[in-house]
Image (cartoon, rainbow, N blue to C red):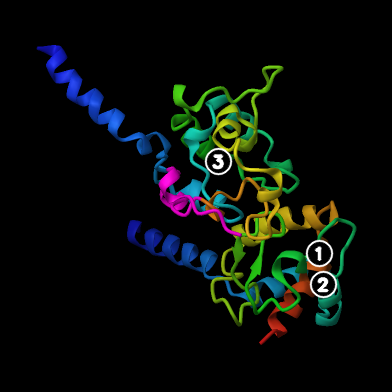
Amino acid sequence: MRRTLAIAALLFAASAQAETPRDFLTRFEKEAGSTASAERGARFFTTKQGGDWSCASCHTERPTQAGRHARTDKPITPLAPAANAERFTDAAKVDKWFRRNCNDTLNRTCSAQEKADVMAWLLAQK
Amino acid sequence: MKNLVALPIMLAVLALPAHADNYSVPKNAAFEEECTSCHMAFPPQMLHADSWRAMMNGLSKHFGTDASLDEKRRAAITDFLVANAGGRKTGTTRDAAGKPLLRITETARFERKHREISAATFKRASIKSPANCTACHTQAATGNYSEHAVRIPK
């Protein structure tokens, strides 16, 4: 019995951790209640949305390339999953960075639709 | 007898002034992961504990950006910074009104150590800001801020 529980716990932990970039697109589309638009995501990503910076200010307009922090100049590894396998594989990190970066660029949280659109566009980058 | 032992130690210390500018950054996984996502690992010894506490209590407005953390991580990193914060060598890290400073570059020690560097030098494209230690302190990543390792880029 104890062993079954341990295996079940392990399986649960594994399923909770093993996330792929596409899982996030699915999650945000579900939360938004509508499908994503990569075209809308591109516009959102590359233009200012109320703050001094756009996403592209740090991540560049070609997120398959490395970027630089707009304030500190520290190099930032590519954001597009095709160019960086570590991106969008950890829900805690994804939520943390959307929280911070939406606040910095929009002075508010991002809607699920905005996040879905950005995900769709990032996934389209090859 | 005690003096005979103390003297060579004192001489040895005097012979190594570079050591005064050594700030080895203690290893801490949470500190490294969170703080160095956006900037270099500033040595905890460069500010006193009250400055670090003030910093870690205002992460949602961290020099103009949102650097907020979950409470568990925030508390763990605060503990690390406080445990390794500066001592007497650091000098005061409060402003004239007694408020803890948040910017290392505004501390008396930083200003004294950089009084020969003009504002224009700090603004060079190759340097950008006084907070960009590694631009001139070539060994800053390993905590070596000694004058011997300084190369000011054009």
Q: Chain of mark 2?
A: A
Which residue corresponds to mark 3? B72
Q: Of helix, strand and loop, which mostly describes the magenta segment? A: loop
Quadrant location of the N terminus of chain A? bottom left
Which residue corresponds to mark 2? A46
Q: Answer whether residue B144 is visible to the viewer in this image.
A: no
- Cα separation, mark 2 vs mark 1, equals 6 Å
- Looking at the picture, how far across and down is residue A49, in whole percent? 88, 62
- Cα separation, mark 1 vs mark 3, equals 30 Å
Name the N-terminal-most of marks 2 and 1. Answer: 2
Q: Amino acid at mark 2?
A: Thr
Instruction: Depth check: give the residue in front, B108 or B97.
Output: B108
Residue B138 belongs to magenta span: yes
Instruction: Depth check: give the residue in front, B88 or A50.
Output: B88
Image quadrant assignment for residue A30: bottom right
- Looking at the picture, how far across and down is residue B84, in whole percent? 44, 33
* Numbered range of the magenta stretch: B137-154
Q: Amino acid at mark 1?
A: Ser
Which residue corresponds to mark 1? A54
Residue A105 belongs to magenta span: no
Labelled pair 2, 1 in contact (Cβ < 8 Å): yes
